[in-house]
Every structure is written in structure tokens, then in C-alpha cells.
Image (cartoon, rainbow, N blue to C red):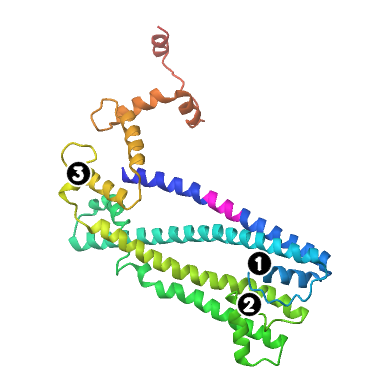
Amino acid sequence: MFRNRGSTLFHEDEELESSNRKLAQKAILFTLVYIFFGVLCFSLAEGWTFIHAFYFVVVTLTTVGYGDQGDWVSEFARFFCSVYALVGILLLGTALGVIGSEIITQHEKVVKEMQRKAAIKREKKKKKKKGLPRGSESNLSDSTETTRFSSFSSSNPYNQSVYRTLFVPFLTLFFIIACGMLLIHFDNGKLSLNECLYFAIITVTTIGYGDIYCKTEIGKGFAIIYILFGVTAVGNVLTEIANKVIDHQHAAAMESILTRKIKAHEFKDFDLDGNGTIERTEYVLRKMILVGLVDQSDILRVEKEFDLMDLDGSGEITMDELIEFEKRESPKDRESDAPVSHETPEVSVNPLQDENKVL
């Protein structure tokens, strides 16, 4: 039962992931179109070069705001900048939210897979220590259905790799900051090391005081790349830290629910079929409902499917019942799905057998 249930949930997750992925791709595409629309408008309105206009658009939408665009040539350009910045920041924030949601979804998928593998390894070790026969390992997949939903424990490899997963984003951020320091140093050689560090950090944190900025065309061209990667690196670090905090809180909540013993007043809630006893499957299902892994309505839908195949209402499905149920469903569909046989039909060599068939 749990294997079928798990496959259904996995299929639904795949559909949701595909939808989120398409939405994230559309958000990226629309953002790029909006950026180049701004570059074109500012180039025409202010007479800027492509690099200068692109640089200004990136500085504006990322809220860096150096303020080095100078005096506006036309009042229309100033008005357009106000509208473009307001709409663009809202658009970019929405797009980043969609993209961030997709990243978190993929992150959670990896975490669940790591939990499942860790649970299987723990179960195998327990089987070996207890000295159980090999045949008992056939129930491993069923037993791990409950352990795979457990929270992060001290033995979980993912919990032990928290600092290692944060090390790479922080290292990437520090490397990008060093690149920013080199950028402003070559663009303006009069700045000290402290001033270069100041420029690099103020830029990637999107503060953008505007007192230090790139002045040459080459510097602005490299600044476009630096701003995009720097802001992304900061966002990645913040996302990773937030994920660790959320994972820790979620794990603590799941641990509390899964390890808490039920009380007498909760008996009816765990007795899902109302027969006066709590079976193992009922206990597991109720725990899964409490931690939000399944919904009560989903269980009812599965039970209805089971009742349709349980023709005699015995609470069990036999092979004969399953064959009879398939016959009642859609014979045409089964015939179309059946493989086509390419074997030569067997020809009878006994004329008496053929006469009996005719009679």
C-alpha cells in the first residue's frame, strides 16, 4: 500500500516540478526582455552607448544605485526612469521569487532523496546486527516508508554537512568580492585597499552609496558582470542560511510529532476505520497526516479505489477479483495495450481435432 501511495505522490510532485520549472523559465525570459527594452529606450532617449545604457539598467534594477548617470538630457527620460525602475524592481522581485521557489523545490527533493537513502542504510545495518534471514529484507521498502519521513538526526549525513554546504556559497561570495576589488583598482588606481573592499561590499549588498564607482567604459562593462554575479552570490548565501534555519525548525516540529506518544483523547483520530482498534497502518497514516505529508481526502480517494477492486467486500483483493475487475473496466483499452504477437499460428496436423472443433 505504501509503495503505491509513494508512487502516486511522486507522480504528482513531478507534475508540480514541471509546472514550476516552466514558470521559472518564463520569468527569466520576461526579465531579459524587460532589461533590453530599457537599454534600448535609454540609449535612444539619452544618447548613451550600449554598455552605458546596459550598465545603468542593471545598476537600477538591482538597487545598487551608484547615481553616476549625470544630469538627464530630457525630462521624459527622467519620468521614464521613474516608471521603469518601479515596474522593473517589482518584476525582478517577482521573478527572483519564482526562481528561488524552484531552487528550494529542487533543494528539498535532494534532501528527501538523501533521507531515503540514509534510512535504507540504517535499516540494512539493523538487519545485519539482528541476524535476520535474507528473506526478511523484502519488507525493507515497507519499513523504510515510515523511517524516511523522520526528521534530521545526529546520524543523518545531511545534518553533518551543514557547514560544508555553506562553505561553497561563502567561498564563492568572497571570491566575487575579491574580483570587485580588482575591478575598481584597475578602473581607478588611486583607491586604497580599504576603499576597494568598501566598493566591492557596498555593491554586492545593493547599498550603492555612489561615492565610488567605475568611470571608464571598460570598467562599466566588467561591472555589469560583477553586479549580476555579486548580487546573485549574496542572495545564494542568504537562501542557504534561511534554508538551514527552516530545515532545522521543520525537523524539530516533525521530531516532536513523530516521537510523541498519543493520548487517550486522540484514540478516535487514530482509529481511521472506526473498528475500536488502532492498527499499524492506521497509526502510520495518522502520523503522516499530522506532519502534513498526506491529506485525509487523499486517503479516502485511495480507499474508494480499493473498494472498487474489492468485489466481494472482504477487505482483501485477490487475483481473481483483480482479473474480474479488469474485464469490467474497458476491454477495448486492454486489447489496444496488449502486445502484438508475431509468432506463426500453430497448425493442427490431426484432422479429427479439426472436425471436433467444427462440431
Image quadrant assignment for residue 97: bottom right
- Could you tell which of marks 2 and 1 lies nearer the N-terminus? 1
Q: Position of residue 313 (x, y in %)?
A: 25, 27
Find out whether the residues at labels 2 and 3 contact each other: C-beta distance under 8 Å. no
- Type of the residue with mark 3: Glu
Q: Is residue 194 left or right of residue 13?
A: right
Mark nearest the camera among 1 and 3 is 1
Instruction: Tell me the distance, in whole angstroms, between the alpha carbons under discs 1 and 3.
Output: 58 Å
- Quick check: is 19 in the magenta stretch? yes
- Type of the residue with mark 2: Gly
Q: Position of residue 328 (x, y in %)?
A: 39, 23
Task: Rate crowding at label 1 as few (under 14), some (14 to 19) or many (20 or more) other CA atoms within 10 Å.
Answer: many
Q: Residue at x 23, y 37 (%)?
A: 273
Q: Residue at x 67, y 83 (%)?
A: 211
Image quadrant assignment for residue 59: bottom right
Task: Rate crowding at label 3 as few (under 14), some (14 to 19) or many (20 or more) other CA atoms within 10 Å.
Answer: some
- Residue bearing mark 3: 279
Q: Which mark is residue 61?
A: 1
Residue 341 visible in the snapshot: no
The furthest residue to the top: 359
- Quick check: is 145 in the magenta stretch? no
Q: Position of residue 118 (x, y in %)?
A: 33, 62
Of residues 156 and 193, the one nearer the viewer is 193
State the quadrant of the C terminus: top left
Q: Residue at x 50, y 28 (%)?
A: 336
Eyeballing the image, is 239 above or below 291? below
Find out whether the residues at labels 2 and 1 contact each other: C-beta distance under 8 Å. no
Span of residues in magenta: 18-25
Residue 5 visible in the snapshot: yes
